[in-house]
Amino acid sequence: SSQWDDAVTSAVAVRLALLRNDLAQAAKGWRKVGMPDSPGFADLESYPYHVYEFLLLTQARFNLSTGQNNADASQLHRALEILASLLPKAEQFDRVTSKIEILVLQALVWKALGEPDRAVPILLKALALGELEDYRRIFLDEGPPMAELLSRCLQVQKESSPVLPSPRYLQALVDSISPAEAAFHPAGKGRAGPVTVAPSTRRCSRISPAGTSVSWGCRRNEYAGSRSTPP
């Protein structure tokens, strides 16, 4: 549907603006999505679930960046509400990549709220899932805020835990994200995260006008359902 394409393209533009820490452009792009800025904004039957989920994840990223840059805790808590609403479906339907992104964002929000001790256990869950599939970019693209949390996670796993994620996997991520990723994202603020995601099952992609691939690890019936019948 052109309606879905327009919404996804605008959401991609928001993510790209957030990658540049350009909140004004991100806000402009979000208005083009054509929905009010509140959890549960999309009508149940308006979008297939993977589109609905992508839009809400984009909104959560926008709220995270806005909250970080403006020291606005209400925006950060709004992001947490959105992410909490998405997690049950990601778990129920084994949407591994979505679950990892949700957990990553939750961890980053808690860090932004000044509670890294709440962020670390959440991120460890995402990392355990990521190691099973050898996901890396979905963590590395989050830049310096993720680097600090990865270092904390590495210390925890070295000291106390024989379970995944392994210290070797965590060390590889820490080594990869610093200093190269920090140089790419020098501000370390307003990071919106990746537009692409690591592969999961069969990939479904759309190409934005800027040539950025928006991908979901999706199953064969993913495009068939609305939000009420997720893949």
Image: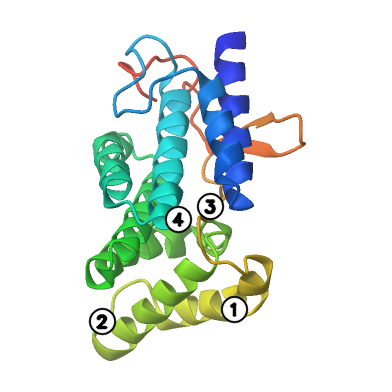
Q: Quadrant of the N terminus?
A: top right
Toward the viewer: 85 or 158?
A: 85
Residue position for label 2? 161
Identify the amino acid type marked 3: Gly
Q: Is residue 5 visible?
A: yes
CA–CA distance in space, label 3 to label 2:
28 Å
Residue position for label 1? 178
Identify the amino acid type marked 2: Ser
Task: Indicate which disc residue 69 carries.
Answer: 4
The crowding category of the residue bearing disc 4, from other C-alpha atoms within 10 Å (few below 14, some 14 to 19, many at least 20), is some
| Among the two numbered marks 4 and 2 on one chain, the one whose residue lies closer to the N terminus | 4
Q: Quadrant of residue 45?
A: top left
Identify the amino acid type marked 4: Asn
The crowding category of the residue bearing disc 1, from other C-alpha atoms within 10 Å (few below 14, some 14 to 19, many at least 20), is some
Q: Where is 40 relative to 217, above or below?
A: above
The residue under the point 33% across, 65% down is 111
Q: Quadrant of the C terminus?
A: top left
Mark 4: secondary structure: helix
CA–CA distance in space, label 3 to label 4:
15 Å
Residue position for label 3? 193
**Comparing marks 3 and 2, which lies closer to the viewer?**
3
